Each structure stands twice: as structure tokens, then as C-alpha cells.
Image (cartoon, rainbow, N blue to C red):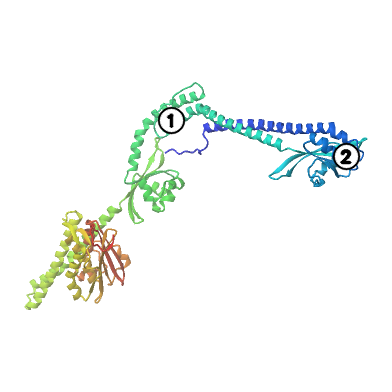
Amino acid sequence: MAVNIFKKGLTIRWKIVLIYCTLVFVAIAIIGVFIMGSLERYYINSVRANLTNTVQGGILISLSNYADLSSNSAEIQSNIDSAWARTIQEELFVIDSGMRAVASNMDNREGTAIESLDMEIVMKALVSGEIAESSDTISGQDASIPIMNLVFPVRHAGAVTGALYIRADMTGIHDTIDQSKQIFINAMLLALAITSIMGFVISKTITGPIQEVTQEAARMAKGDFSQEVSVKSGDEIGQLAWMFNELRVQLSNTLLQISGEKSKLETILRYMADGLVAVDVSGRIIHANQTAMRIMNVEAEDLENKLYDEIIRDLKEDLVFDELAEKCEGGVAAETFSAGGSTYAVRYDRFKDENGKDIGIIMIIQDITERQKMEDMQTDFVANVSHELKTPLTTIKSYTETLLDSPIQDDETAKSFLAIIDSETDRMNRLVKDLLHLSRLDHKQEKWFKKEINLISLLKACVKIIEFSAKTENRHLNCIFNPEDEIRAVVDKDGIEQVILNILSNAIKYTKSGGRIDIDAFTNNKTAHIVITDNGIGIPESAISRVFERFFRVDKARSRGMGGTGLGLAISKQIVEEHGGSIELQSREGRGTKVTVLLPAAPTRGRRGIE
């Protein structure tokens, strides 16, 4: 499977559009800054020039006639009100050499304060005798107002006698410049939009063939070599398309030769039931199929990051590379070992290159746990059956020989001997019957007569059958279920009755005198539960997992003395499983045992419990 090593980012098409837009934006921005700056300077210079020409052509000439501006303030104010107010629309202040305003064209003359003026440029004009200028803002009713301050020195007989202060409102000029900027920004956005569209169209002609080659390369990466890229031009992109088609043909021919063998080999390795591991001479695993990784309990990443010896030591120390190489010097070697509760058979041998040089070891690991378990079970089964048959046969043989060799005059003794022989014969008969029953279950030869019945009725019948035996043994049977309820299930009545009676019999056998056995039934999640709990001797924790094994007894001497064959629970488990159910056992030594039989419940009304 191919891995994409490239990070996702902008495509070439969008990069071209971005470059176009960036170039246009930079060019327009530079032009805009230059134009806006020039326009702003033009308007400000125009205002300055107009004010300068107006003042120097009239007002300054009139003021230069006064040697003392303060003494003639009334006359100066009268001139401003009568004549100059029509010529000068801006705010005008006449300031004497003592930095006092002697006249103004402001309506609120009494409120005219010298502190509202820029005294720095006034001082500069008075001291240097030159025109001074500054820009500022003043607070208006709704917003700040931009202004231009111009100060002209007033001369009389060559000496500076005061200053003419003009404050011009620049709001109109600034609004004009702002509107011009907005128009320019709108034009720039429109130009960028048009540039983006054109750039996208132009870039498509460039990136289209490249994208086609990329798509075909992606198909090739997935194994599809049937596509061909169309060559539409003779430029570099056209040459790339032509070379790609040539590459496709050559690569297709090459891969076609090896794909068949590769496919066969991969299929064989993937579906091998045995684990296959190939290790090179450096101790690195060069191949391991899924079965081998499962047996060694490793992931694909471990094969890349760890050496063979690091991995195999967790399974078996003797299988390290040096040990294998030494054992298979003479050819194929094999051995069997156990690990993690499983049994494995392993075969290994060296493999060589075409020059006959050793390049590693191939090992086959076969999980033979189930086969070994079956062989062990068969061996145990034969031994258990032989042991179970040997005891009664020995007893029968002994008493029969006694009766034959030594005539017994006492009829009671003879009857006693014959009763023992009859009891041991019955015991063998039960054993053979249970063995035949298990054989039929194992080979699916048992015939079931399933029909829908009420499990509550079946439980009541079983309790009635076993009740006499319980009273005789001084055990109390406590039925927790409601006798009027119905729990219906489709089962073989005789088979489930055998299961219930077997569990109840075991509960009676292994509960001390005066003990109690609780019997309950209910449904939960459409499953019928039959629960039988006793407060008997219980089962050791180490033996719980084996109670359903054939011939297994916790206390063999006591179980055999009670007439058990050790097959009852094994038969019960198989009967329940044949009905699509399960049987569970919980126990604590000295505290009692709880056995739960779970069966699929049939849909019916009147069922007690949770549906």
C-alpha cells in the first residue's frame, strides 16, 4: 500500500492565482500610496497658497501701517468686520508682540482665548519673522475637526509688531481624500477579483495537463495501468505526458511478469494455518505471516523495531538465532515446546541465495495445542474408563470367586454377596449407559423431541421426583419461583429434566444434613434462567474450571462412594448446549454452590422477570 509522504497544501493552480493577485495588489498599493500622497499634498499646498496670497495681498499690508497693534485694536477689529470678513472665511486672529489677541473674526469674540491657539508657531513667527505652520485637531460637536494653522509676521518699518494667525478647517479636504481612498480601494478589490478569475482560467490551462498526469499516476500506484495521458502540446508539459505514457507501458510490462507469482506466494503465506518466520543472518525478521505474529504476540511495528532474538525470547529462550543455526547445520530440525498454555511444534532450516550462501533461517511454527489436548483427553478417558470398570469388576470377581470356591451355608451372607455383585453390576451399567449417551451427543446422534413447554411445570415435577430423596437425606428444598408463573421454552422435556435432576442430585449429595437447596426460575433479556443454589461443602477455586470435564471428581473417594460416575455434569453441559443454551457454575469452598442453566425463552405472555 502506497503511503502519501507529501503534506497537503495549496495546489499549483491556486498558487498561480495567489501570485497574480499578490503582484496586482502590490503594484496597485504602491500606485495608490503615491497617488493618495500626491493628492493630499496638492490639496494642502493649494489651501496654503490661496491663504498666503490672500493675506499678503491685503490684510498684512493694512496691518503693517500700525506701529502698535494693541493701541489700534478697535480700528483693526472694525476693518476685519467690515472688509476682511468677506475675503477670509477661515478663523483669523491678530496677535500683538505681547502674545495677546487684539482682534478676531470669530462671532464669540469675548470668548476668544489665546490659549486655544498654537503658541509655539506664534512665538516662532514673532521671533524669526518667518511664516510658521502646524496641523492639529480640535474637538467639535460630533467629532474631531482637522485644522491647518498658519502664522504670518506683521511688520512695521522693518520690525515685527505682531502676528496674523489663521486657522483653516481641513474637513472638506480630508473628506475628499477619504472618498478618493475608498474609490481606490473599491477599484483595487474589483481589480483583484478580475485578476483572480483570469488567473484561475490561465492557471487551468497550465495545471490541467499536470493534474491529468497526477491522476493517472495515482491510478498506477493502485495497480491500474490501462489509462493513457493525452499529449496536447509540444512544450515541456506535453513532453512530460509523452514520457509518462512510455513509463506506463514499460512498468506495466515489468509488473505483469512478476504479479502472478507474487500473488500466489502472498496468498499461500496469508492463509497458512502455520506460522512462518524468515530471519536474515543479521538477526532481523524479514518476513512473518499473520499466524506467526499472533503466536509470537507481536505487531508489524515490532518486526521493524526489534531483532528476532528480542521477540522470540518471550516465547522460548532456546529458539534464539544462534541455537537454531547450530541445530540445523545437518539439515531440517524439529522440536516441540509449550508456552503460554499452548503447545507448539517447530521446524526450521537454513535458506541460501543463488550462490549457495547462507542468508538466513526459515522457521515453521505449528500450534498443536488442540491436537495435544485431544490426545491427552483420549489418554485420560481410556485411563478413567479402565479405572472405573476395573473397580466394580474386581469386586464382582472377588465375591464370585468366594461364592464358587467356598460354599456358604449362611443364606444371609450369600444374599449379601449377591447384592454387592448386583450393585456393582448396576454401577457398571450406569457407566456404560452414560458413556453411550456421551458418544451419541459427541456424534450428534441423539434424537431430540423439542416442543414448547412450561419450565415452571417441569421444575415442579423434578422437585417432586427428588423430594423423597431430599427428605431422606434431611435436606430442605426451597422453591423460590412462583408456581403459578409460566416460563415457556422450546426444549426436549426428557433432556432438560435429566439436567435438572442431575444438578439437584449433586446438590443433595454435597450438602450436609440439615442443609438448604434453593430453586428459582425467571427470564432476563429473553433468556430463561434456572438457578439451583445450595449451602453445601462447595468446590475449591482451583477445581471450578474442571467440573464439567468427564470423570472429573473434586473428592474422588467420596464421589465414588456415593455412586457417581463423574459424567453427569459433562452430559448436562452438552444437553444444554444442544438446546442453544449454556450452564454456569459458581462456588466457594465451605460456602456452597450455585448452578445456573440458561435457555432461550419462547415468546409468551405471563412470564415473570425482565423481558
Write down the quadrant of residue 554 in the picture.
bottom left
Q: Nearer the viewer, residue 66 or 280?
A: 66
Residue sitting at x 92%, y 38%:
67
For marks 2 and 1, give the CA distance.
96 Å
Residue sitting at x 26%, y 73%:
516
Q: Determine whether, in the image, residue 210 is placed left or right of residue 352.
A: right
Residue behind mark 1: 216
Residue behind mark 2: 75
**Residue 163 seen in the figure:** no
Q: Label 1 neighbourhood size at 10 Å, few (<14), some (14-19), many (20+)? A: many
SS under mark 2: helix
Query: Mark number for residue 131?
Result: none
Q: Quadrant of the C terminus?
A: bottom left
Q: Nearer the viewer, residue 481 or 340?
A: 481
User: Mark 2 or mark 1: which is in front?
Assistant: 2
Asked if residue 319 is positioned above or below residue 351 in the image, the reply reads below
Q: Nearer the viewer, residue 195 or 332?
A: 195
Asked if residue 116 is positioned above or below residue 207 in the image, the reply reads below
In this rendering, the count of numbered labels is 2
Residue 282 screen position, x and y as percent: 45, 44
Residue 123 screen position, x and y as percent: 85, 42
Q: Determine whether, in the image, residue 326 is placed left or right of residue 143.
A: left
Q: Label 2 neighbourhood size at 10 Å, few (<14), some (14-19), many (20+)? A: few
Q: Determine whether, in the image, residue 382 is placed left or right of residue 329.
A: left
Tag 2 near tag 1, CB within 8 Å = no
Q: Determine whether, in the image, residue 361 is placed left or right of residue 399.
A: right
Write down the quadrant of residue 23 in the picture.
top right
Residue 392 screen position, x and y as percent: 16, 67
Q: Callout 2, which amino acid?
A: Glu
SS under mark 1: helix
Residue sitting at x 20%, y 71%:
561
